[in-house]
Amino acid sequence: MQNMLQQFDSLTRDAMLFDAIDSGLIVLNQKGEVVVWNKWMIQHSFIDSEKALKQTFLMLFPDMSKRLQMAVSDALSQHLSSIISARLELSVLPLYQNEESFQLDKRIPHSLTVTPVQMQQQHWCLIQVKDATRRENMEIALKRTVLEIDTMVSKSKEQEFQLQTILNNTLDSIVILNRLGRISGFYSSAQKMFGYSEYELLGKPLSVLFPSPFNRSFEMLINEAKDDEPFSVFEQAKSLKSNGEIFHSDIAINSIFEGEDMQFIITIKDITERQIAQDALYREKEQAQVTLSSIADGVITTDIIGQINFINPAALKLTGYKHEELINKRIDRVITIQSDNNLFPVFQCIESGQQVDSISGDVLISKSGSQLVIHQVASPIHNQLGDIIGAVMIFRDVSKSHRLASRLSWQASHDELTQLFNRREFENQLERFIDSARNESSQHCLCYMDLDKFKVVNDTCGHAAGDELLRQLADIFRTKIRGADTLSRLGGDEFAIILNKCGLGPAVNIAEEIRATIEDFRFGWDDQSFQVGISIGLVLIDIDSPDQEEVFKAADSACYAAKEAGRNRVHIYSPDDTEISQRRGESRWMVRIQNALDQDRFQLNYQPIIGISEGSADSIHYEILLRMLSEDGELIPPGAFMSSAERYLLMPKIDIWVIENLFCWLSQHGDYNSSDIFAINLSGQSLADESLLYRIKQLFNEYSIPAKRISFEITETAAISNLSQAQVFIAELKQLGCKFALDDFGSGLSSFAYLKSLPVDYLKIDGAFVKDMVDDPIDRAMVESIHNIGSVLKLKTIAEFVENAEILSALKEVGVDFAQGYGIARPKPLPTDGSKLF
Amino acid sequence: MSRHLQANISDEQKNEILYQMAELALSESASLISSQGHSKVKFTVDSIGLKSKQGLDSLFNPQKPDMLAVCHRVDGVCSGHIVFLLEEQSALVFTKEVLNEGDQMQEMSEMEEEALTEIGNIIINNFLGNYAQILDESVSTVIPTLKRRHYIQLVDELSNEPDDKEFYIVKFSLEIATHSFCAFILWFDHFCQLGSSETEQQKMTTLKD
């Protein structure tokens, strides 16, 4: 009993020990039967001990793994211990944490040890089961933490790498300073910029990188920085490279905290290029400002809505406003310009995007109310993207030149003596009237008027009297015509009237009235009284009229017929008049000229042209002038017959007569040692005559005249009218050695550009500008202008109509090279007695 | 060859027997581990022989001396220690491959060490089991322990013999996935004396036959 009790006590004690263990305990006997199944096993296998005991382990767990089977077998048969880890084979036995897990078959991870034991002299096996849940959870947590740390470290490394890459590759330099202001970091970009390696600069002060006073300034700022306050400074400074080179830089200093330590990051940007660009821009701006302030043209710029944002001094002067009166104001509200354009050019160019060039003749009304004729150009201003951001208006006062142009234009179309239209303008008007008659089926009348007995006054009282008579007669003619009629002086004592929209009947009445008035008119001069008459030829201009030349010829014929019929009468043209004229050979002047040529009734005169400038003082030229001798031996001035000669294409004959006779005179009387030059006038018709050119060359040979002693004068108008022929003509004779002068220069209104294409040697300034240059500043300006042009083109200038010492003195002031006129010497016939010319 | 042949067998014969035993044991172990783990493993015997402590530097890599060893104390007739060991880093990689652990930890967790211990246990148990069966010897082991030691230190600790006493060492290669490692089984004390008794010699001769 006691044994049983002892055994029972022992068993109970063992059972209590087994149940106290916080792990599973299974004991298998030699047969593999379960002999111990502790409380832990009951709780976690949900197999009670009643079921477990006496069962074999295999029967209890028929799905046991091979590994466990082997382990149990090894332990029971071969006494080998085994360990079955919780990780290599998961959940070897179906063990659960609780009821819920059991229901869900959610097994707990566990490990086992299988140990052979000796029991009752038999080989039993002890299986210990340990719950690995906590270990597994801890492991999972640990691994998760490690992963997170790895990720953080990895990320941190990546960020550090990225930062390092940025710091090493940024264009700006990065330098790190410690709290004491010593360099503690010097990245690749800084190394490149300054030319130092990192180790050279670590621990060094800022003075290595920045010259005085910048380094001291930065050090002071750093020293004064408070530890608990963020610090940020941005300045421009000079930086110092290792090779001593100093460069401009933008500096930013910012504080950073590494832990509790304050450090400073200095960012240095090399702004040398920017500085250079800024300097260049400033210089350009300065240059532009100075230029704009200096030029005489007014410059105004506006923004896109026309608001003025810049005015130069010239613009202020021209407009008469003050700066503050114009700036930021809309241009069209402060500046008044009268123009044919409705839209202000500035707005026009902004709208179109194109430059707008105003027609000259726009009138700027200044603040004081004065009017200035201006030429203005407006251009759009673009930004870098090509968008229009405003406009610039440039304008200049062309009032003087406008007046000059108007005057020149007037002079080109008017006879200076009588202020009537001249021949050229008459021809233009006649052409218009003929066109009008054709296009509108209208009728006009041409009155060709030739004075009777005009020569008497001229010869008796002189040219001055003749001129005065012509002026007074012109005034009378003006009173007899209507506003739409055209009154012209054709030359000499010939006049013409084109009666607008007038039939023959009324024209005869007007012509008759004129005739009667002239007949009754008495001209008084020097206590003498003269009566003159007028012969008038009338021709109708209508739809059937031929061209202008024929109409003119018809009128001329009619006038001739009036003369033939006894003068002082009006004759209406009829075809017979032309026939008569033709039967007589030609018109009267044509005949007379031809006869004069045939009979050598021309006279060569000369007028000296003296040098008045330094380089020309020793030279004397002589212009050859032509006079015609009438049948009675009276001298007829060229003005009386030249126009007819031109009309009847006789100029080449006259010109060749002049040349041949001059050459003949030179061969007989000329001094071959002399360097004097003889200037011969050539007409436009001669320039176009190739045979004439050939003949001139022949004459040089025939008379052995040195070509260098001959100068030919051609008018500006003749040259431009026959430009290509003139160029050839001039080139051919210049090749021989002749010189050329451009006569009446300044009055032809041709562009100076043509001048460059004519290889002339002299410019003869139109006498119309010279004779009044002392009193008229515009005329003086013209003379100066022409002389300056000539100087630039290396041409000598010759002034005509030098009538007195004042003019001569003025010409010398201007620098004109030669002078010609009554004030120096009057024209004289070429001497045949060997006397000196001048 | 009959039982009654000469009882003395040479070291070469011993090696031959051990070689075959090792091959068999490792083959069985590889199958079991492959079925339990997540990757297929392969063990191949490279060599087998006697070594003394002096010869260890030629066997192991002095640059990587730290080893992980699963140590089994053997009791019974064949007493001593039998150890499965390999370089610590190799053990880390091998274990994580077997367990398919993708983490980047450079140390093994406790449960991973337990798994490695089990792997060593499987290998040694197969080895000892075959040995006991074939030679009809009785052996018993206690639960293996995992040691982390310098190889010389390990040998010092586990071997009771003087320095010049030799012990058997099986060198074999572990292949798993794309890795290949070198591993060892060291058998101290008893097996060195294998064949010293007549009975053993007879058994070994029989084996050989």
Image (tube, coloured by chain):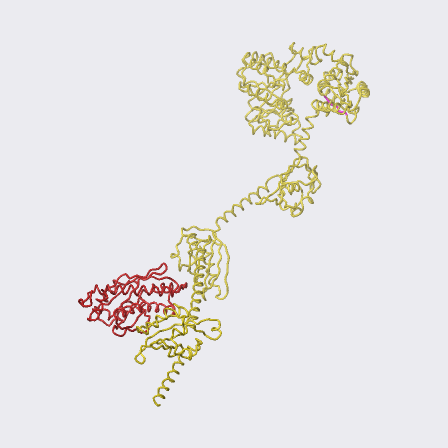
| Main secondary structure found in the magenta portion | strand
Q: Position of residue A590 (x, y in %)?
A: 69, 13
Q: Where is residue B99 in the image (x, y as percent from the top left)?
A: 39, 65
Report the front residue among A390 and A613: A390
Instruction: Report the quarter where the N terminus of chain A lies.
Output: bottom left
Magenta span of residues: A485-489
Q: Left or right of A573: which side holds A639?
A: left
Residue A169 appears in the picture as rendered? yes
- Supply the letter of whichever chain is yellow: A
Q: Which image quadrant for residue A109?
A: bottom left
Q: Which image quadrant for residue A399?
A: top right
Q: Position of residue A572 (x, y in %)?
A: 78, 16
Instruction: Report the quarter where the C terminus of chain A lies.
Output: top right
Is A487 in the magenta?
Answer: yes
Residue A493 appears in the picture as rendered? no
- Position of A320 relative to A580 (above/below): below
- Position of A214 relative to B169 (above/below): above
Q: Which image quadrant for residue A446?
A: top right
- Supply the letter of whichever chain is red: B
Q: Left or right of A404: which side holds A478?
A: right
Q: Residue furthest toward the front?
A: B2
